[in-house]
Image (cartoon, rainbow, N blue to C red):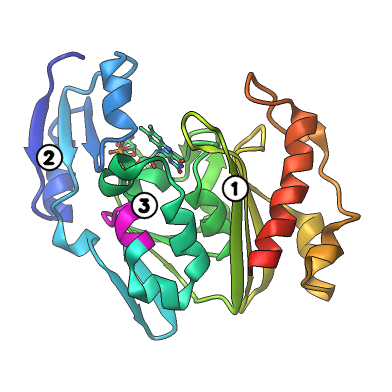
């Protein structure tokens, strides 16, 4: 790991100022992705701007028909939150499945969605819940936020401040974890909400997280696991790697989706 300068930001405005002071600075939240990358010398930021202690990026609230989760909220806090368990138990369940206790106590929802790892859990929930990503300068619909492998609509210095969504009527999440990392080999989040049925799939797509239109159509008429039995997933659009072939993942998408609906 190369030497780097550490800065603790006290507010979103302070973080923007600190980041703007150096072209090579990067934000850090839980550091659960960025620090290992720096240790491998795949990233070498001159400065780290720590977002973890910014009060306006912490906490979970439910009011006015919206759930708001501050970007600095850890996976463990989401998993244990009474508000999330009441408004969307499937999201608390998803958070409880991320990595291991250290990752859950350090990693944050903001860091996870800003990183947009193709096998990360949260992006599938953000799509299925039709979440809004609130940044320091605008609001971005989840449908427009995740743009490719490790790619998002964020500008270089843009900060995810919070995510918001309307509590769904029903939702479920099921993932087949990689036995070593616990990342999703395939994970499916299904939600029936104000905007209808939405299905987010992570871990399987060749271009990252995606919505499954055929499953959404099948579940709109009949929200049951049986409704998915005839729905298939085209392997040519899926990831093939040392962990599993595209055909294997195509099967996993269907199995995980049926389990997610049953859980919902
Ligand atoms: C062993 C291990 C197992 C894991 N297993 C899983 C798993 O099963 N499922 C899963 O989903 N994830 C898993 N992860 C990843 C984990 O969830 C990370 O916490 C997450 O990917 C990144 O969150 P972070 O807060 O640590 O971000 P950081 O590592 O601090 O930052 C990640 C990136 O996002 C940027 N960033 C951070 N916060 C913000 C913000 N608020 N606004 C804008 N940009 C920001 C940073 O500049 C950096 O580029 C695992 C990680 C490890 C090490």
Mark 2: few/some/many CA within 10 Å (<14, 14-19, 20+):
many
> Residue 217: where, in percent of width, then height?
81, 64
- Is residue 136 in view? no
Which mark sits nearer the N-terminus, 2 or 3?
2
Give the quadrant of residue 168.
bottom right
Q: Which mark is residue 175?
A: 1
Label 1 residue SS: strand
Q: Does residue 74 belong to the magenta stretch?
A: yes
Label 3 residue SS: helix
Name the mark nearer the viewer: 3 or 1.
Answer: 1
What is the distance, in whole Å, between disc 3 and disc 1 at their CAs?
18 Å
Q: Which mark is residue 109?
A: 3
> Residue 240: where, in percent of width, then height?
70, 24
In this image, 80 relative to 26: left or right? right
Give the quadrant of residue 63.
bottom left
Q: Which residues are magenta?
A: 72-79
Q: How many marks?
A: 3
Q: Is mark 1 within 8 Å of ligand 1?
A: yes
* Residue found farthest to the bottom: 64
Q: Is mark 3 within 8 Å of ligand 1?
A: yes
Name the mark nearer the viewer: 2 or 3.
Answer: 3
The residue at the point 53 percent across, 32 percent down is 179
The residue at the point 49 percent across, 76 percent down is 166
What is the distance, in whole Å, between disc 2 and disc 3 at their CAs?
22 Å
Label 2 residue SS: helix
């Amino acid at each position: 790991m190369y030497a780097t300068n550490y800065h603790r930001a006290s507010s979103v405005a302070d973080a923007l100022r600190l980041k703007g002071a150096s072209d090579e600075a990067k934000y850090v939240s839980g550091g659960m992705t960025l620090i290992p990358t720096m240790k491998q010398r795949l990233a070498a930021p001159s400065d780290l701007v720590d977002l973890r202690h910014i009060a306006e990026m912490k906490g979970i609230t439910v009011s006015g028909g919206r759930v708001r989760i501050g970007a600095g909220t850890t996976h463990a806090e989401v998993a244990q939150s009474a508000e999330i368990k009441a408004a969307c138990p499937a999201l608390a369940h998803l958070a409880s499945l991320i990595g291991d206790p250290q990752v859950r106590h350090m990693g944050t929802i903001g860091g996870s969605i800003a990183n947009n790892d193709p096998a990360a859990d949260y992006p599938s929930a953000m799509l299925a819940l039709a979440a809004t990503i609130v940044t320091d300068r605008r609001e971005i619909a989840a449908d427009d936020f995740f743009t490719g492998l490790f790619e998002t609509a964020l500008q270089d210095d843009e900060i995810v401040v919070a995510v918001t969504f309307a509590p769904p009527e029903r939702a479920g999440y099921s993932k087949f974890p990689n036995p070593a990392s616990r990342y999703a080999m395939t994970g499916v989040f299904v939600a029936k909400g104000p905007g209808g049925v939405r299905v987010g799939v992570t871990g399987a797509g060749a271009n990252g997280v995606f919505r499954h239109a055929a499953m959404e159509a099948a579940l709109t008429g009949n929200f049951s696991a049986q409704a998915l039995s005839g729905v298939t997933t085209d392997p040519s659009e899926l990831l093939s790697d040392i962990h599993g072939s595209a055909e294997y993942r195509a099967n996993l998408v269907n199995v995980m989706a049926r389990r997610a609906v049953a859980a919902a």
